[in-house]
């Protein structure tokens, strides 16, 4: 997958994941050939990411190709620019995430979403977690945010969580 054809190749693999999931295949690691997996990895993606998109698309009708591509373009940019094309080697322990009912400034889910987004940027989400899952999507809708936009803001604000929360509050009020 060259940089120039990333969206087209991502589309092909996204559609393949949809078709395989629709046929009842449930092994994310077996969705793609070794060459396809290597192409995904070269851009900071894993088969699990496309599996999750396919599963949610087929069960809930979202997030859809456009949202998936937008999220993965941010992840890919971070992977290539910040990580120099090298995977992190670390995996987030889902047990370390704040509870789903935790809140910051009255915003339920945000304390959980921030570390998930940071882990997504770094390619550190375990297979049991999806950035852009149903809970994330409910939060984004409630606050007028796009998943890729939030991910880019997490990158931009770095460790300054207060600035990120301020941005979410301002967006949700608009």
Image: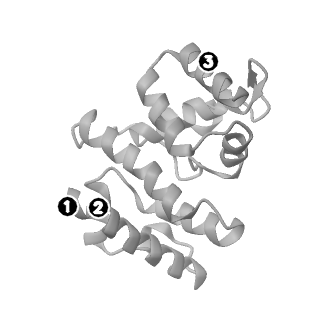
Judging by the rendered image, the residue that carries numbered circle 3 is 166
Residue at the spot 62% in from the left edge and 18% down from the top edge? 166
Secondary structure under badge 2? Answer: helix
Measure the alpha-carbon separation of dots 1 and 3. Answer: 37 Å
Label 2 crowding class (10 Å Cα cut-off): few <14, some 14-19, many 20+?
some
- Tag of residue 85: none
Measure the alpha-carbon separation of dots 2 and 3. Answer: 33 Å
- Please, is residue 48 above or below residue 115 in the view? below
- Please give left or right for residue 33 compared with residue 30 in the image: left
Residue at the spot 72% in from the left edge and 26% down from the top edge? 173
User: Are the residues flagged by discs 1 and 2 in contact, CB closer than 8 Å?
Assistant: yes
Residue at the spot 44% in from the left edge and 74% down from the top edge? 31
Measure the alpha-carbon separation of dots 1 and 2. Answer: 6 Å
Front-most of residues 23 and 15? 15
- Please give left or right for residue 94 compared with residue 125 in the image: right
- Tag of residue 2: 1
Secondary structure under badge 1? Answer: loop
Judging by the rendered image, the residue that carries numbered circle 2 is 6
Instruction: Count how many numbered circles sit on residues in the image.
Output: 3
User: Are the residues flagged by discs 2 and 3 in contact, CB closer than 8 Å?
Assistant: no
- Please give left or right for residue 46 compared with residue 144 in the image: left
**Quadrant occupied by the C terminus:** top right
Label 3 crowding class (10 Å Cα cut-off): few <14, some 14-19, many 20+?
few
Residue 20 pos. (x, y %): 51, 80
Q: Quadrant of residue 104?
A: top right
- Please give left or right for residue 13 compared with residue 66 in the image: left
């Amino acid at each position: 997958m060259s940089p120039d054809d990333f969206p087209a190749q991502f589309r092909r693999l996204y559609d393949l994941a949809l078709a395989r999931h629709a046929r009842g295949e449930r092994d994310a690691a077996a969705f793609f050939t070794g060459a396809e997996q290597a192409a995904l990895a070269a851009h900071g993606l894993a088969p699990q990411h496309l599996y999750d998109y396919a599963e949610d698309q087929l069960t809930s009708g979202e997030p859809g190709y456009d949202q998936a591509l937008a999220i993965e373009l941010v992840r890919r940019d971070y992977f290539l620019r910040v990580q120099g094309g090298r995977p992190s080697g670390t995996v987030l322990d889902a047990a370390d995430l704040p509870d789903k009912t935790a809140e910051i400034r009255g915003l339920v889910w945000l304390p959980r979403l921030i570390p998930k987004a940071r882990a997504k940027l770094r390619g550190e989400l375990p297979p049991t977690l999806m950035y852009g899952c149903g809970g994330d999507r409910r939060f984004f809708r409630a606050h007028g945010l796009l998943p890729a936009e939030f991910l880019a803001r997490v990158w931009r604000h770095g460790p300054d969580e207060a600035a990120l929360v301020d941005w979410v509050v301002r967006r949700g009020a608009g």
